[in-house]
Image (spheres, rainbow, N blue to C red):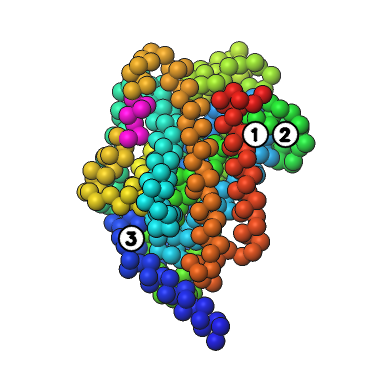
Amino acid sequence: MANHQTKSTTKHHLLASTDQQQKSLDEVNSSVSVPKNAGFWRTLMAYTGPGALIAVGYMDPGNWITSISGGATYRYTLLTVILMSSLIAMLLQAMSARLGIVTGKDLAQLTRERTGKVSGILLWIITEAAIVATDIAEIIGSGIALELLFGFPLIVGILITAADVLLLLVLMHLGFRKIEAIVATLVAVILFVFLYEVILSQPQMGAVLKGYLPSSHVVTNHGMLYLSLGIVGATVMPHDLYLGSSISQTRNFDREDRRSVAQAIRFTTIDSNLQLTVAFVVNSLLLILGAALFYGTNSDLGRFVDLYYALGNNQIVGAIASPILSMLFALALLASGQSSTITGTLAGQIIMEGFIKLKMPLWAQRLLTRLISVTPVLAFAIYYHGNEAKIENLLTLSQVFLSIALPFAMVPLVRFTSNRQLMGEFANRSWVTYVAWIVTVILIVLNVYLILNTLGITG
């Protein structure tokens, strides 16, 4: 009898969630067919795709300099931090997908529903700032990549990157699977470029494997601790939690059937974990590349342009230096920036629809989202025209915004997915809830520390 009531409660939540308001990303919600009574691999293929869109947020240009600098400064020691960050990402994204699948609503919609009007607007402003901050690294990265590859002025590169919203509009009409395929292809480009460059660099595999083991130096060495916090802070992105809770609903499964819902949760989580494993490998390759090529060279690697020219300088990286390595780096940077801006635009739409219930045509909504994101970068680029070092300093400021916004996404996510009245039998297990709260508190503390350090308040 109790089991029947639990199933009824879950069914009630699923039905209520789809009837009360517009669906998240309505034009692609439940648009991808899922086979019934199919085998494991066929079912997994049907659910594979959203994880790639999530993964790009964990290996966007904002992570690159931090990871490569970590390797160049401390060799392989900080690989353990990348591993820890990836495990945290898997936990949070699994919870995000579960929330969307069970409730039929995304994190933005649920947060707005359960807050007052004033606090809802405040949360929207903070979250919108996080989208802008996320786009800063991606737009700058893509703009610089276009400059390095084709010689475009940086301002022109930024405008070209901003126009990717037009591509997204076309792709959405062709089907969500097309977006997933393009992003997955760009992810593959990033992976193979850095795998090739790392193979050429011939890292010491024994030292690499040892780097994944926890080290007390990460905590006791102030410089190492600060860089570790930078890696963690740059890896866990708040916009990905909103995005994951929405695109997990793109599969067309029977939302009234408990087994169908459980299957959706299972395969979406598998897809997410597989793709985040790819992100983990890419971030590891970035750090390994920094360690193998730049450790002990005293090279200035604080900018994308510095990294580009260093890879072609045989006085820095030795005999493997070549223009091809530099061009491949720029190609991967372009792939990372473009894939990230596509998913950033989707996340911006989710947040606008969820928090302020914006009623306007989708093309206008996406254009508005892109204008909000690109305007500060473009203004900065025009003001500091010719001074790319100043423009890239925006990356530091963007990480501060992301650090501020992260708790406002994590805390509601943990609360909602642990709420049995909302989630029914699919609520987090007790141990998952405890681990999630511990991770949330730790990340909040670390990000506060990062903010204070960035502002020069702590030593």
Spatial separation of the CA atoms under disc 2 and disc 3: 44 Å
| Crowding at mark 1 (Cα within 10 Å: few <14, some 14-19, many 20+) | many
- Dominant secondary structure, magenta: helix
Picture quarter containing residue 311? top right
Q: Residues within 10 Å of mark 2 (few under 14, many from 20)?
A: many
CB contact under 8 Å: marks 3 and 1: no
Q: Is residue 68 visible?
A: no
Residue underneath mark 3 = 23
Report the residue marked by disc 2. Answer: 218
Whether label 2 touches label 1, CB < 8 Å: yes
Secondary structure under tag 3 reads loop
Q: Quadrant of the C terminus?
A: top right
Gap in angstroms between the C-alphas marked 3 and 1: 39 Å
Judge whether 111 appears above or below 280 on screen. below
Locate residue 76: give its quadrant.
top right
Magenta span: 372-378
Is 339 contained in the magenta span? no
